[in-house]
Structure formats: structure tokens, C-alpha cells
Image (tube, rainbow, N blue to C red):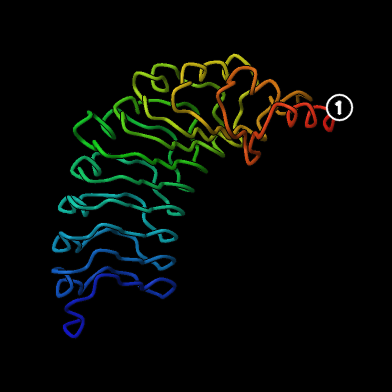
Amino acid sequence: MGAFGHLTKLDLSYNQIRHISGLEPLAPTLKELYLVENKIKEIKNLDSLVKLELLELGGNRIREIGPGLAKLTKLKQLWLGKNKIASIGTSLQTLVSLEILSLQANRLTSIEPENFPSPDANPRLCEVYLSENGLTSIQNLKHLSMVKIIDFSFNPISSINEEVVNPQTMPLLAEFWLTDGKIENWDEVGKLSGFKDNLRTVYLERNPIEEDKRYRDKVYMYLPFLEQIDSWPIVNKEDLEADRKRRA
């Protein structure tokens, strides 16, 4: 790697890599590292990459995040989708610059208190993607005060926990995604009514509530400040009337 002393981006995706190693010569300049769809089981040998801002490890065989990220205090984006991670643990607490976290398509069944223990742990985290896991509830995320986008889609979640998702704990929330969940009570949608200052998009399609012929109309009735419902932008209220007739 010595010949690449000024490299800022390295993409080794879609290979047969089993171990992360030999990256130390790139430490002075490397900012983005892509290792998608390899056979990596462990996050390690990254301590020297102190300038790294983006790490993409999606589509590997990682079962735990572990301590291998501890020194990456400048990391802004961490992509760990499509692995076998069952627990977050305390591995993210030193990532004080983290802005985007993706743990989509893993094996998470819960978010624990030690995952995001205080506002100081991840003070800049603004996008959190947790879709396609086994989460049955929304919990232990109340310290993510900067979050703007949060994605719980494709999880069997039937209730929106107001202790976590409320304008006081998430004052900047602009997009709430819970496609393919288990929301069947309209009162759950009403729990988002306090977000009138910033919330502009919700994804709730393919929940039981979508069986209602007036689905979009009712979502808008509960949340009249929205600009988009699912992939459907609200241009004017006449659009809602047309949608209602189409569903009738």
C-alpha cells in the first residue's frame, strides 16, 4: 500500500476478503473505506485510521461490532447493513463525530440502555437506520436529540413509544419511517402530532392501518403539517380527495 500514500478513498468491495489488515500506510490520508460484500467476520485493525470519516462494511459476516472502532473519533458515517449483528453493545460510545448509522438487515431484537447512554456519546447523530431487524418496540433512543431521520421499517413494531419519540427528545425529527410494521391503532399515528415544527415525512404503508380506505386522508388528518406520506408528496388537499376516491 506504500505507493498510495495520498489516497483518500479506497473501495475493496465485492472481493473475497476475510480479514481487515495492511491499511496502516494509508492512515495519514484515508477518509473513506468501502468493504461491501466480502467475508469479514470481525471489525479490527482500524486503530491507525484516525482520519477515517466513512466506513462501509455492509454485506459481510459480522456478528458483533466489538471494540475495533474505538479510535475512529472522526468517523461520520458507519454502514453495517446486511450483517449478523445481534447487539450494539457499547461499541459506538466513542464515535463522537458520527452523523449517520446504518444497522439495517441485522439480527437486533432490542435497543439497550448502554447502546446510546447519554447525549454526549453520539452528539451529532442525525440519521439512524434500523430497518429489517427483529425490533418489537422503540426504546432507549431518547438521547439522540439531533436525529432528523429514523427508520424502523420492516420491524414488528405495533406502538410508538412517546417516552422516546416526542418533540422534547427529538426536536429536529423530520422523517419517521415505519413501513411494514404492525401499527393497527390510529392513536399511534396521533402520537406524532406534536412534531408540527419539523416533521414533514412519514412512511407507514403496509401497516394494518393502510387497509382503511381513507388511509392517507386519516394520516393527514392526524398530521396536517406533513408534506409527504409514504412516497406520495402532498401537493394540495385535492390530492387527498382523489386518493380517497381511488381507494373506495
Looking at the image, which residue is at 36% across and 56% down? 62
Q: Seen in the image, is 143 located left or right of residue 219?
A: left
The secondary structure type at the circle numbered 1 is loop
Q: Quadrant of residue 7?
A: bottom left
Q: Is residue 1 left or right of residue 207?
A: left
Decide which of 198, 231 is in the foreground and name it. 198
Q: Residue 70, position in %: x, y?
A: 17, 50
Q: Return the x and y of residue 200 as percentages of the image width and height.
A: 52, 31
Rendered position, 119 above or below 14: above
Disc 1: which residue: 248
Q: Position of residue 196 (x, y in %)?
A: 48, 21
User: Looking at the rendering, in which quadrant would you find the C terminus?
Assistant: top right
Residue drawn at point x = 23 percent, y = 29 percent:
119
Which one is nearer the viewer's eye here, 164 or 156? 164
At a point 21% along the width and 81% down the height, the residue shown is 4
Quadrant the N terminus occupies: bottom left
Residue 9: image quadrant is: bottom left
Classify residue 60 as left or right of residue 54. right
Rendered location of residue 131, percent (x, y): 50, 42
22 lies above or below 51 = below
Q: Amino acid at mark 1?
A: Ala
Q: Look at the picture and state if 213 lies above or below 13.
A: above
